[in-house]
Image: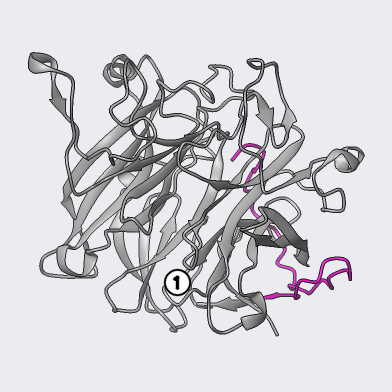
Amino acid sequence: MSKCKFLSASVLFPLFFACVAPAQPLPKIALSQVYTQLQIDRPVWMSEAPDGSGRLFFVQQSGIVYIVKKGSDGGDAKEFFNIENRHPYFWNEDGLLSIAFHPGFKTNGLFYVYYNQENNAEQRAKFQGFPYRSVISEFKVSGTNADVADMASERILFEVGQPFPNHKGGELVFGPDDYLYLALGDGGSAGDPLNNGQNLSTLLAKMLRIDVNSRTTLGNDYRSFQLNYGIPSDNPFARGVGSVREEIFAYGLRNAWRYSFDRKTGDLWAGDVGQDLWEEVDIVTNGGNYGWSIREGAHYFKDGPPGAKYAEPVMEYAHRTSDQPDGMFPDHATGNCIIGGYVYRGKKYPALDGIYIYADYSPGVIYGLRYDREAHKVTAEGTMLRQPKSIISFGEDLDGELYAFTQDGFIYSITAP
């Protein structure tokens, strides 16, 4: 996450409400601390096992996954998975960044993780001379203890060379189509120096979609080889030609930090971290080009091909107050690092139904918007909560209830009147 420094808070302030201006008729929300006996060092992700066990799996960026029983105080936390000895967390935006459970996890025990590694000299030669790599692996739960991962079961699906230590994206999520989705950042540094955003021969700056249940063979005759995963036939560049990567689902994303499927509509919502001026929210569609690094938000960042068309963001907001009048929504508060969230579909708080809830890391403000899918426009937007803690990520349980994870290692549920 560019510009999102994840600095530790030295003082824990109480959380408080912000009233919504009449022009933005969204309900106010609050953060209520849960799992009070659990404190995780840089909690970046959470997923509930789809097996009816009521187990929540919290990801610590250093390389550990903890199990907590849903509804407990967190004092029952167990270590499920640990790769700290691989040192995946060597810079601010690296680490173990997510876990995703196979839709058939209840019977097959399979799960997937995304983590980062520094390359030695031999590995650099393998990955275009790049000093880092991202790893997407499949693991299996122990056959004798469902609360422990079988660390010897790792099957690497693929690895991607990384030129810089930032912009890793890094969320794994299964879509309603049972395919595995992963967004990778543009490779890092600043300004997309390698022009990965519009380059279809690289997986960087893309939303990827793969089938973990099949294997695709590429090439012809003696030059053919089998991937450790399948390419969905309706990927936009499936059966492509030349060097175009068939895993690509959408492209032109700078560094999508947290994205989610609306469990009612199936829409894929993403918060894409901006460069210098604009943060954006996108609905990511099959074959969509979201503009980076020709555009940042709805604005041109540098010259591009004449007549090129790009998918418009659903929402954008400025870093500086002086730029607010030029934004799609001039009344949106400023920020500098978006944290993508979820469309609320839980049962506890009907007033939140259909609202996409997202945040900005630096001021810790939580925003919301309502979107008319038929009209393709935002019908309401605004600030739902101002509070002083830096929000790193959001989470959703199987009931559709939402959580926020803060820099100081605490877990909060999102509540409303």
Q: Of 5 and 345, which appears nearest the observer? A: 345
Residue at image mark 1: 397
**Relative to 312, 342 lies left or right:** left
Where residue 394 appears, x then y in whole percent?
55, 61
Secondary structure of the residue carrying tag 1 is loop
Q: Residue at x 72, y 24 (%)?
A: 301
Q: Which quarter of the picture shows residue 160?
A: top left
Q: Which quarter of the picture shows residue 119?
A: top left
- In which quadrant is the N terminus drawn? top right
Q: Residues within 10 Å of mark 1 (few under 14, many from 20)?
A: some
Residue 365, visible in the rendered structure: no
Q: Residue at x 28, y 18 (%)?
A: 126
**Relative to 101, 40 lies left or right:** right
Q: Residue at x 41, y 80 (%)?
A: 70
Q: Which quarter of the picture shows residue 133?
A: top left
Give the residue type at disc 1.
Asp
Where residue 177 appears, x then y in whole percent?
34, 55
- In the rendered view, tell whether residue 328 sits above or below residue 354: above
Task: Give the residues drawn in magenta, as a range.
Answer: 1-30
Q: Of 89 and 244, which appears nearest the observer? A: 244
- In which quadrant is the C terminus drawn? bottom right
**Relative to 117, 183 lies left or right:** right
- In the rendered view, tell whether residue 51 sits above or below residue 267: below
Where residue 42 appears, x then y in whole percent?
52, 55
Where residue 61 appears, x then y in whole percent?
45, 50
Q: Per the image, is 12 magenta? A: yes
Residue reaching furthest left? 222
**Relative to 33, 210 lies left or right:** left
Q: Residue at x 32, y 24 (%)?
A: 240
Q: Dominant secondary structure of the magenta stretch?
A: loop
